[in-house]
Image (cartoon, rainbow, N blue to C red):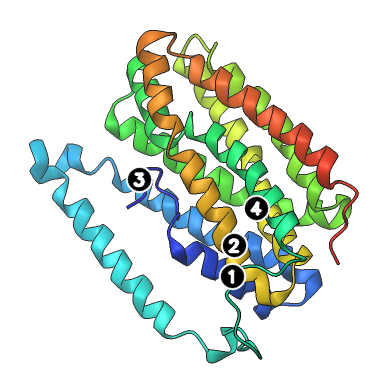
Amino acid sequence: MSVGSGETGPYLSLDQAILPRTSDLKRRTLMFSLYNLVGYSASSGGSLLAGLPTYLGTGISGYRPLFLAYLISGLVGMFLYSRLSKNVEQDPLKKSTRQILSKDSRPIVYKMSALFSVDAFAGGFVGQSILSLYFFQRYRLDLTSLGLLFSAAQIVTAASFLLAARIAQRFGLVNTMVFSHIPSNILLTAIAFAPTAAVAVPLLLGRQSLSQMDVPTRQSYLMSVIPESDRTPAAGVTNVSRTTAQSVSPSLSGYAIANLWVGSPFLFAGTLKLLYDIVLYRSFHRAKPP
């Protein structure tokens, strides 16, 4: 179970490798955008349900239906995966190999994994659990209000994916990744200085309208610059790197809130993410995917 409400398990890597087989090159980024659109839309519905314990009862009994819903959604997902066509399977290798990645793919995959790890590490400072704590402690938003806030944030994020595909088609994948990320990080940093929830909430929603545009473009770019035989391991390596890096920063964020300043995680996250954007652009803006 992900503490950040997002998909971080093995299915994400498999999905990323499968999607390019279902579309041509011109529609690849759009397919990743639609994939993330559906996921974030479902997450928005889940965020709305987070307020149910307030009405279902006090104590742990009010939360039990949420865990039951989590179980049911997992079973539905298992059924849907079982109905996939065999056409999504990768062609078997002609010869066995012990190498996870081919020699040509390793440099770019490892470099992108390192960069994505920095971005994920920074994002862990302001994950949904930390945001919930921040908005509760600083602005005294209750569980129902937090559920509505994060549901709205997921809806805004989901809508941005379709826009990301159109922008990438015109300006390129790397440009879309970087130049949507930079203003979102400025908005993220500004949340630390918001005096009231009336100011902080629009800043958060504005940030969410831009911050995840790099998700489908990043996935599409990675799947475009490596051969098909390396797509599954490449997605696995990059996602494991991101998940591992993101698992460290929440504890640091909690320490910073308790011992430094309640807004310090936003400053750390915004600064690191801006550094990531600069290095990403300098490293890959000339490398055009096929």
- In the picture, measured across the screen, residue 18 lies left or right of residue 3, that is right
Three-letter amino acid code of the residue under disc 3: Leu
Query: What is the x, y in percent for residue 84?
Result: 49, 84
Q: Measured along the vertical axis of the image, is residue 65 above or below residue 55?
A: below
- Asked if the residues shown at circle 1 and circle 2 are in contact, with their CB atoms under 8 angstroms apart, the answer is yes
Disc 1: which residue: 232
| Disc marking residue 161 | 4
Disc 3: which residue: 48
- Asked if the residues shown at circle 3 and circle 4 are in contact, with their CB atoms under 8 angstroms apart, the answer is no
- Between disc 1 and disc 4, the foreground one is 1
Identify the element where label 3 is drawn.
helix
Quadrant for residue 54, please give it.
top left
| Disc marking residue 235 | 2
Query: What is the x, y in percent for residue 65?
Result: 17, 53
Three-letter amino acid code of the residue under disc 2: Ala
- Name which of mark 1 and mark 4 comes first in the sequence: 4
- Asked if the residues shown at circle 1 and circle 3 are in contact, with their CB atoms under 8 angstroms apart, the answer is no
Query: What is the x, y in percent for residue 271?
Result: 64, 22
Of residue 226 and residue 29, the one placed in the foreground of this image is 226
Q: Measured along the vertical axis of the image, is residue 34 above or below residue 174?
A: below
- Between disc 2 and disc 3, the foreground one is 2
Q: CA distance from mark 1 to mark 3?
A: 33 Å
| Disc marking residue 158 | none
- Between disc 1 and disc 3, the foreground one is 1
- Name which of mark 1 and mark 3 comes first in the sequence: 3
Whether residue 60 can be seen here: yes
Q: CA distance from mark 1 to mark 4?
A: 23 Å
Of residue 156 and residue 133, the one placed in the foreground of this image is 133
Residue at screen point 53% across, 15% down: 192
Of residue 107 and residue 134, the one placed in the foreground of this image is 107
